[in-house]
Image (cartoon, grey):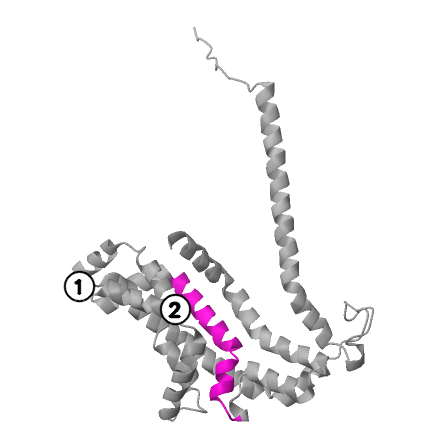
């Protein structure tokens, strides 16, 4: 004779059901508020870019016309020749070549020099290592204006004025902030991985590039994107070191265009500014997954 098996199921009381329902409603409202806040913030951040875009497609007379026409193709015919006119004056082919060259080489230098120095500070024992690292971080407190004149005089004595070297060399000599960032990532990788690789016969360089670099790939991408963006948007140093018109960068060319016309052709200024902005936006959106991952991990592990 089989004995039926009974399960003692405890049903939640009406008070518990009511509490869970209220909690679910609160969570839904909170998530909705957060989503609305993020959406409004995203619209606020993208609005200037959209305004630049619609203004760059207007003719000169409609730039400041009221009411503002927000929708090209619907409210007015886009004037794509504005980009052609901006290109003819700013010589974007030359400007892009110069800016991409400087930004790319400097970004590679920042990543490589920061990688090597951070590897040394995090993995090797040396006398006064902590003191030297503290001195390195102390350089972050020195304002750029204080270093500007000595740097210029140094490059002038080396005969490097009106060349790209003053804009490229500082990256290859190391950045204190990038070294600090990469060192923080290195310290999160267990030393046991280095010891195991050493037992297998791997040397320091092989350990770095085959064991550690894959572990901190996100941090390296953050360093390269940050360095590339900084050099792409840099205005003061190219203006100071580059005197030839054929060596101008994007920021300097846009400034010369504004100075020549006094900001009058606003639609052409917006076309030039948008042409300068597009490469950085494309780079960020193409690598945003790694960039966000690196920033999040640095915040958690740092």
- Element type where label 2 sits in the image: helix
Question: Magenta segment range?
Answer: 217-244
* Along the viewing direction, whichever of 147 and 162 lies nearer the viewer: 147
* Along the viewing direction, whichever of 160 and 9 lies nearer the viewer: 160
- The quadrant where residue 56 appears: bottom right
- The answer to whether residue 26 is above or below residue 280 is above
Q: Which numbered tag is attached to residue 201? A: 1
Q: How far across and how far down the image is residue 127, in percent?
A: 18, 65
- The quadrant where residue 194 appears: bottom left
What residue sits 61% from the left and 41% below the top? 30
Note whether residue 216 is visible.
yes
- The answer to whether residue 37 is above or below residue 282 is above
Q: How far across and how far down the image is residue 156, in percent?
A: 39, 91
> Which residue is labeled 2 in the image?
140
In the displayed structure image, the side of residue 261 where residue 95 appears, left or right: left
Q: How far across and how far down the image is residue 89, in percent?
A: 64, 89
What residue sits 45% from the left and 59% below the top? 295
Mark 1 is surrounded, within 10 Å at the Cα level, by few (under 14), some (14 to 19) or many (20 or more) other residues, namely few
- The answer to whether residue 79 is above or below residue 213 is below
Query: For the C terminus, which image quadrant?
Result: bottom left
Disc 1 vs disc 2: which is toward the camera? 2
Mark 2 is surrounded, within 10 Å at the Cα level, by few (under 14), some (14 to 19) or many (20 or more) other residues, namely few
- Element type where label 1 sits in the image: loop
């Amino acid at each position: 004779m089989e004995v039926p098996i009974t399960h003692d199921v405890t049903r939640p009381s009406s008070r518990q059901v009511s509490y869970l329902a209220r909690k679910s409603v609160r969570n839904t409202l909170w998530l909705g508020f957060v989503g609305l806040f993020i959406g409004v913030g995203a619209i606020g951040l993208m609005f200037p870019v959209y305004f630049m875009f619609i203004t760059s497609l207007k003719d000169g007379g409609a730039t400041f016309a009221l009411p503002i026409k927000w929708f090209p193709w619907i409210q007015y015919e886009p004037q794509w020749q504005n980009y052609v006119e901006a290109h003819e004056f700013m010589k974007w082919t030359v400007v892009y070549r110069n800016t991409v060259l400087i930004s790319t080489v400097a970004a590679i230098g920042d990543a490589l020099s920061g990688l090597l120095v951070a590897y040394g500070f995090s993995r090797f024992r040396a006398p006064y290592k902590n003191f030297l690292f503290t001195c390195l971080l102390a350089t972050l407190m020195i304002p750029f204006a204080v270093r500007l004149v000595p740097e210029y005089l140094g490059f002038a004595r080396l005969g490097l004025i009106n060349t790209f070297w003053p804009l490229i060399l500082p990256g290859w000599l190391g950045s204190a902030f990038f070294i600090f960032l990469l060192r923080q990532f290195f310290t999160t990788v267990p030393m046991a991985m280095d010891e195991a690789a050493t037992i297998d016969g791997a040397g320091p360089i092989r350990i770095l590039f085959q064991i550690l670099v894959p572990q901190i790939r996100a941090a390296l991408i953050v360093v390269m994107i940050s360095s590339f963006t900084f050099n792409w948007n840099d205005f003061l140093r190219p203006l100071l070191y580059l005197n030839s018109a054929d060596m101008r960068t994007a920021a300097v060319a846009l400034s010369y265009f504004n100075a020549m016309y006094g900001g009058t052709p606003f639609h052409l200024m917006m076309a030039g500014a948008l042409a300068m902005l597009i490469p950085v936006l494309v780079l960020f959106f193409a690598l945003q997954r790694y960039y966000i991952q690196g920033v999040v991990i640095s915040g958690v592990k740092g």
